[in-house]
Amino acid sequence: MTTGMAILQPVVALAIWTMVMWLWMYATRIPAMNKAPEIDTANLTGGTGKDLDAVLPANVQWKAHNYNHLHEQPTVFYAIAITLAIVGQGDGINALLGWMYMGLRVIHSLVQVTANKVLVRFILFALSSLVLIALILHATLFLFDIHM
């Protein structure tokens, strides 16, 4: 693998995980929508996924909520990881941090879509945020030529 590119592996892994969550979301949501007497799927128009919170079981919607979460903070991870790869700084500790971030996000997903314990989710989110902050700090130090 080209120097600095190892961090792209957790980027691709998290993208794959996002699509796994997409499949899981629809595998549970479509059957639930078909069973919901309030939803006429043949004539359904407009609205948002959030509108389904009042109609579908919470544990079905948890998958959709998590899928949305995977399009929020992880976009910053993608940008910083690609930046680090471009400047040749995506190996070593930064690749390790990338895998840590990816792993924490997968664990966060699994907690959210199963037990959905808010305190556990918060701790996992906070830990993944600290890892992301470390990656941002590493990119900042390198790109702005700051020596500590």
Image (cartoon, helix red, strand yellow):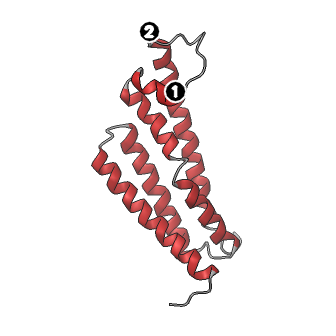
Q: Nearer the viewer, residue 10 or 133?
A: 133
* Residue hosting label 1: 27
For label 2, the SS is: loop
The answer to which of marks 2 and 1 sits earlier in the sequence is 1
Q: Residue furthest front?
A: 46
Residue drawn at x 43%, y 56% is 104
- How many numbered callouts? 2
Mark 2 vs mark 1: in front: 2
Distance Cα–Cα, label 2 vs label 1: 19 Å
For label 1, the SS is: helix
Q: Hey, what amino acid is under mark 2? A: Pro
The label shown at residue 75 is none
**x, y percent for residue 61:** 43, 30
**x, y percent for residue 1:** 69, 69
Q: Residue furthest bottom?
A: 147
* Residue hosting label 2: 37
Taking the image as shown, residue 20 lies to the left or right of residue 119, namely right
**x, y percent for residue 20:** 54, 40
Residue 106 lies, with reference to residue 31, above or below; the image says below
**x, y percent for residue 131:** 45, 66
Q: Residues within 10 Å of mark 2 (few under 14, many from 20)?
A: few
Q: Is residue 10 visible?
A: no
Residue 64 lies, with reference to residue 11, above or below; the image says above
Q: Is residue 9 visible?
A: yes
The answer to which quarter of the image holds residue 8 is: bottom right
Residue drawn at x 59%, y 74% is 91
Residue drawn at x 46%, y 56% is 103
Residue 123 lies, with reference to residue 117, above or below; the image says below
Q: Hey, what amino acid is under mark 1? A: Ala
Q: Residues within 10 Å of mark 1 (few under 14, many from 20)?
A: few
Residue drawn at x 55%, y 44% is 18
Q: Are marks 2 and 1 in contact (CB under 8 Å)?
A: no
